[in-house]
């Protein structure tokens, strides 16, 4: 679904708000999310991807593990504690 949405709208930047997420991505889910998002980001030449981190430490670490799973790529990924910080990174 995310892939088709990104292909339709072709964003330059992406902002994900995970602040209220309470669960941890399993290793399998981390791989799936990393591969799916990376393919979508590369398909539309996404420049920046900002993620507002969950308040739970373990859940926020799983976000960072997803980025690590994606490996080196041209998309600038940033993790933030507040929506304001994330928006500033994206210039909005």
Image (spheres, grey):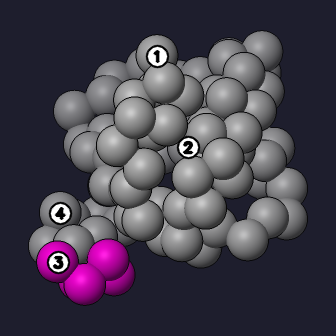
Label 2, label 4: how many angstroms apart (C-alpha)? 16 Å
Q: Nearer the viewer, mark 2 or mark 3?
A: 3
Q: Dot 3, how many residues are within 10 Å of its Cα: few (below 14), some (14-19), or many (20+)?
A: few
Q: Are marks 1 and 4 in contact (CB under 8 Å)?
A: no
Q: Nearer the viewer, residue 75 or 16?
A: 75
Magenta region: which residues?
A: 88-92
Q: Secondary structure at mark 1?
A: loop
Q: Nearer the viewer, mark 1 or mark 4?
A: 1
Label 1, label 4: how many angstroms apart (C-alpha)? 24 Å
- Residue 92's label in the rendered image is 3
Label 2, label 3: how many angstroms apart (C-alpha)? 22 Å
Q: Which residue is mark 1?
A: 1
- Residue 13's label in the rendered image is none
**Residue plotted at (54% across, 28% down):** 3
**Residue plotted at (34% across, 43% down):** 9
Q: Which residue is mark 4?
A: 83
Label total for image: 4
Q: Where is residue 61 drawn, in percent x and y?
A: 58, 46
Q: Secondary structure at mark 2?
A: helix
Which mark is first along the chain, 4 or 1?
Answer: 1
Label 3, label 4: how many angstroms apart (C-alpha)? 11 Å
Q: Is residue 12 above or below residue 63?
A: below
Q: Quick check: can you spot residue 43?
A: yes
**Residue plotted at (31% across, 28% down):** 21
- Residue 63's label in the rendered image is 2
């Amino acid at each position: 679904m995310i892939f088709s949405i990104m292909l339709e709208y072709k964003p330059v930047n992406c902002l994900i708000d995970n602040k209220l997420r309470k669960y941890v991505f399993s290793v399998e889910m981390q791989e799936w999310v990393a591969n799916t998002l990376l393919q979508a980001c590369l398909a539309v030449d996404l420049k920046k991807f900002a993620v507002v981190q969950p308040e739970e430490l373990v859940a926020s670490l799983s976000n960072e593990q997803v980025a690590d799973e994606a490996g080196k790529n041209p998309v600038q990924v940033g993790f933030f504690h507040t929506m304001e910080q994330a928006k500033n990174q994206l210039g909005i």
